[in-house]
Image (cartoon, helix red, strand yellow):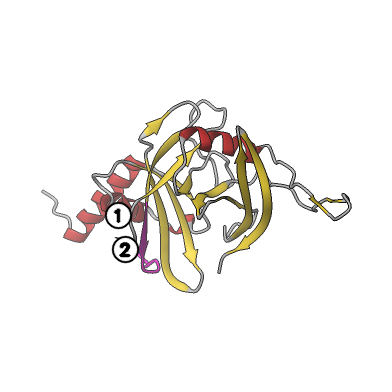
Amino acid sequence: MLLLPVRACIVAGLLLQAAAAAPVRLGPSADQLSKIDIAGISTLVEGQGPVWVLIAQSQGFIPGRFVEVFLSPEVRTPSLRRGRMVSVQAPPPTTGDVASVWKRTGAEQPYAQVPLSRTDPDQVTNSRDLNRPFRIVGAFSDEEIVSLVAFIRSSPKVPGNPRPGGTLVMPNSEVQGQWPIGLLSHSGGEIRVSLLDNDPRERSGQSVIVRRDGTTWIVQRVNMWVSD
């Protein structure tokens, strides 16, 4: 009987586990995630549910790898899916078959996905896909999430501000509804939608502040955001 070294057995087991999971990899550092990394992350969150999407990012000048782990949705309807995500990190990638040590950072957070009109809502083709899930901060009802995302995807115009005397000053921007949503937050009485622009580093985009008037969403202002 052929006996394999202990490390080789561990690596082989991790590779088999990663192949079975096959989560979607997104983000600027997605290519750095090996099958061994995916298996290690899956093991770290084992018992919380299958891994669906991994969004791998950098943290400016902080060394290491940082991944947002989106578990399979717990709430599934044709118009909305909701679940939990956790953040994990590991040292910079190594060479060879040495498995990185991943650890969790912070508590679980909720996420949502408003599926596009396609057969398989689990399908997320790339980082620019509007079907990708987004983090949630604050309290939102299902109806609020669905209607707000539909409003943002319609690329509404930014309203002008009337000057004294009634002259309307029109802004030079509009909501970029074809940019994917990275974050939906409700904090301090303010509702904000963070959109990711075309920069593959995913460290800049558009911040849309909205309010609700009855059943209608209204854009209050739009800013650009840049992360360090």
Image: 182 above or below 123: below
Q: Which mark is residue 82?
A: none
Amino acid identity at mark 2: Ser
Question: Magenta residues, as a range?
Answer: 86-99
Q: Nearer the viewer, residue 49 or 95?
A: 49
Image: 224 above or below 112: below
What residue is shown with label 2? 100
Q: Residue furthest front?
A: 165
Q: Label 1: few (<14), some or many (≥20) within 10 Å?
A: many
Q: Nearer the viewer, residue 143 or 206?
A: 143
Q: Is residue 64 located in the magenta-colored stretch of the structure?
A: no
Tell me where residue 124 appears, x and y as whole percent.
51, 39
Q: Is residue 162 left or right of residue 220?
A: right
Q: Is residue 104 left or right of residue 28?
A: left
Amino acid identity at mark 1: Gly
Tell me where residue 18 appears, x and y as whole percent.
32, 46
Q: Residue at x 47, y 32 (%)?
A: 80
State yes or no: discs 1 and 2 in contact (Cβ < 8 Å).
yes
What residue is shown with label 1? 40
| Residue 177 seen anywhere in this rendered image of the structure | no
